[in-house]
Amino acid sequence: MIFTSFKFLLFISATLLGYFIFPKKYRWLWLLGASYYFYLSASVKYSVFLIFSTVITYFAALAIERMGAVSILPEWTKEEKKQAKKKAAGRQKLILAVVLFVNFGVLFSLKYYNFAASSFASLAGIFGLEVSPSVLKIAIPVGISFYTFQVIGYLIDVYRTTCSAQKNFLKYALFVSFFPQIMQGPIGRYNELAPGLYEGHKFDYNRAAFGLQRMMFGFFEKLVIADRLAILVDTVWANYAAFGRLQLILACFFYAVQIYADFAGYMDIALGCAQIMGIPMAENFDAPYFSRSVPEFWRRWHMTLGSWFKDYLFYPVLRSGWCTRLAKSLKKKFGKTVSGNATTAIALFFVWMFTGLWHGASWHYVAWGVYYGVLIILSMLLAPLFDWLVAKLHLDRSRPSYMLVQGLKTFVIVCIGYILFRSDSMSAAAGMIGAIFRIGTPVTTPLSMGLDEKDMLVATVGIVILFIVDIFRYRKFDVRQWIGEQGLWLRWIIYLAAIFAVLIFGIYGPAYSASSFIYFDF
Amino acid sequence: MKIKLYRILKTVSFLVLFCILFSGVTYVLRHKGEAEIPLPFYEEEKNSLDVVFIGSSHSMCSLLPMELYKDKGIASYVFASSAQVTAQSFYQLQAALKRQMPKLIVLDVSGVIYDAKIGSEEFTHVQIDNMEFSRVKYQAIFDLFEPADRLEYIFNIIRFHTRWKEVEKEDFLPITSYTKGAFVSTAVKEQVWEKPVPAEEKEELPKIPEEYLRKSIELCQERGIEVLLYNAPACDSVGFARQYNKVADIADEYGVQYINFMYLTEEIGIDPTTDFRDEAHCNVYGAQKVTKYLGDYLTERYDLPDRREDPAYAGWDTQYEAYRNAYTY
């Protein structure tokens, strides 16, 4: 069930109504039922994987927690106590490793097996070996990348004792399957998300109004902006060689807006739903295109994924045995700075390669991840050089013009990244980048980019609205609060304008064409 | 408690305002082609029509209710939409009977050769979108369409919202017509009339249209309304003559009359070089001949009142004037 379907509107109405009718104590059960209905309506067959992940991590967390509570007898010697703790820690580690392996194994087999096999075959081909691996004919279960990360995060948290294991299986199943986040995140942390899920919240008029507003804005972002721009972006990407430089650059810009409006729109719908029920969920975006550096962009874009990688991959790699050993030996030979930079760079490289791969099983995603990895490592390594340059040129970093240039630079870098991200293959990405930078490319060609003037006007107005809302977000100014403080009529005008903007200008439903309504078909 | 009540009142008012705006926006956006045929039906005085014609473009092109009134004093309306097949007509009939209690229903059987519940997706919109809000409308939607297609007939904004680009002044105005459901066309396209096979040669009808044709007749008979089956002259129908001949058996079975104009073209003086607008439809000149014949037939066979002297029908005379001023033929 997708958020932008009529079925979802019915579903969410029924779910919200049921939520507030149910006795407070059991509202979480109603949510569990609704969440499973939501997921099963996407695919009954693939829900097996969701249930499998839920069951295995549920028991693993319980086991890890139980083993952590080592029973130590007072008569034991210090050495015996140490041994017992060590043994328990070893067992915990083993369980964690096995369960991580199994969960990632499922994710890998379903999402990456074909990619890995075909990559291996082409690698073998380079050495003259002919390998024809069998192809796995199975669709990827929806949301698997999100919920797998969520359950693994939970398990590691239990292992690290930053959260205690959930004893109630059904409650745990709700944490994994909560419908607003199962398809596209945000990837929730148990400590942050779970308490809100289990506590029955009473109906709050203002909160419900805010939630609805947020959902409405999400629909606007998705249906009016993202899906409209998608037509242009798809047209240009499908036939990039036929377009001029300016058109290609515009398409990159529009793709940046499309992917943001699409993803952030989905988040606004998800968080809006949850807000109506009083359930706090993690934010995933914070005006990312106003970032002044690439690392800042990644702190504002898909925030829950970034923080997941930071907590469960970056730091573990940095603190791993081999990395600390490497740091020590480098420190001896080259000093503290080099050692610190080198190990951070290694950890960052892992993070970005996997970030790329997480987005899809294809080399252009890997290249996209590595692109960011290299940029972030470079910006870290070259930071002293930039500082020196800024000082030499007497640039004032606090000036708006300086910040603007930084912001634009970051946005351009992100847009170039999107070429790698959006293209279907590495060669297509290279072709597009080549076409933009090649001297012979015409500025424009008469070919239509897929949207007429009226659609472009709507898209532009939509982008301006999104831009303004993001300025407010960036400045921490609460637009909804402001709307809420206005008089009834102005508020209603704003609400109705938003609803009808989506109903009229949204891209949905079967296309109407006047030509098929010519008289007397019969 | 006071706050609660105020909030409930506020929410309800907002929803009401939304619904009003929603129906307005839906009306403006929707494609209105051909709406002037069925839509003014709802402006007719309740239970004022003596004859209602139900059918497809064949009906609206071959019948002139205004002339029927002028010549015979019969108050009638062509409640039709293009490409309307028999199952659709069954619901159009029910929609008509919610408003009118006519003495006679004339059922156009042109759709009986199509083994489908709907003629074309687009023209079913013309039919359903111009049907008033009632249970019949939803029964029609649920019967005629697959579940996935139903929603766009309940909320046609789903289909037509992209028309925002082509909305004109006319889209905001109410729809008016003087023709009582006739499509008056003076276009002429010369046709070659091929003689149909003898009326005795017959072929079974497809299942769906036969079922709905029977249901339509039965519905009228249950309500004590007389039924006349009718097939308009159309050059491209000749190839299906055997099936149209089969309709006669069904008419006999139910004891109703059937006029198949396919065999009456010579008698009523249809000239294929001047009386058609295309291969499937009469123009107004053909329609005059069909209407004339039908007028005589109806007054002879059915007990229909002459409404010309009835003061309640004075509006019909003024409408006839407006009609004649609007159309010259």
Image (cartoon, grey):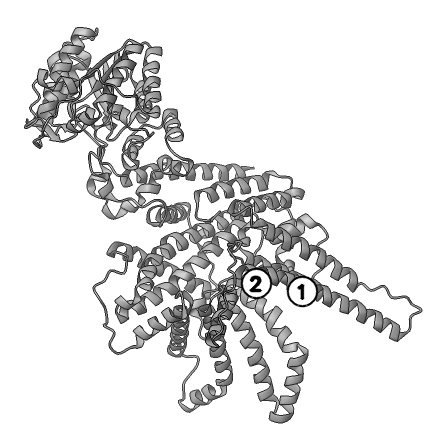
Kindly identify the amino acid type of the residue bearing the numbered disc 1: Ile
Q: Earlier in the sequence, mark 2 or mark 1?
A: 2
Kindly identify the amino acid type of the residue bearing the numbered disc 2: Phe
Place of residue B321 in the rendered image (x, y in percent of width and height, measured from the top left): 10, 22
**Who's the residue at 34% across and 39% down the image?**
B21
Residue position marked by numbered label 2 in the rendering:
A108
Front tag of 2 and 1: 2
Picture disc at residue A156: 1
Q: Alpha-carbon neighbours of circle 1 within 10 Å: few (<14), some, or many (≥20)?
A: some
**Who's the residue at 29% across and 14% down the image?**
B250
Q: Is residue B313 left or right of residue A223?
A: left
The answer as to whether the residues below labels 2 and 1 share one chain is yes
* Res A302 visible: no
Residue A391, by quadrant, is bottom left
Residue B118, by quadrant, is top left
Q: Chain of mark 1?
A: A
Place of residue A364 in the rendered image (x, y in percent of width and height, measured from the top left): 44, 69
Q: Is residue A85 left or right of residue B213?
A: right
* Res A335 visible: yes
Residue A415, by quadrant, is bottom left
A350, above or below B201, in the image: below
**Who's the residue at 32% across and 39% down the image?**
B26
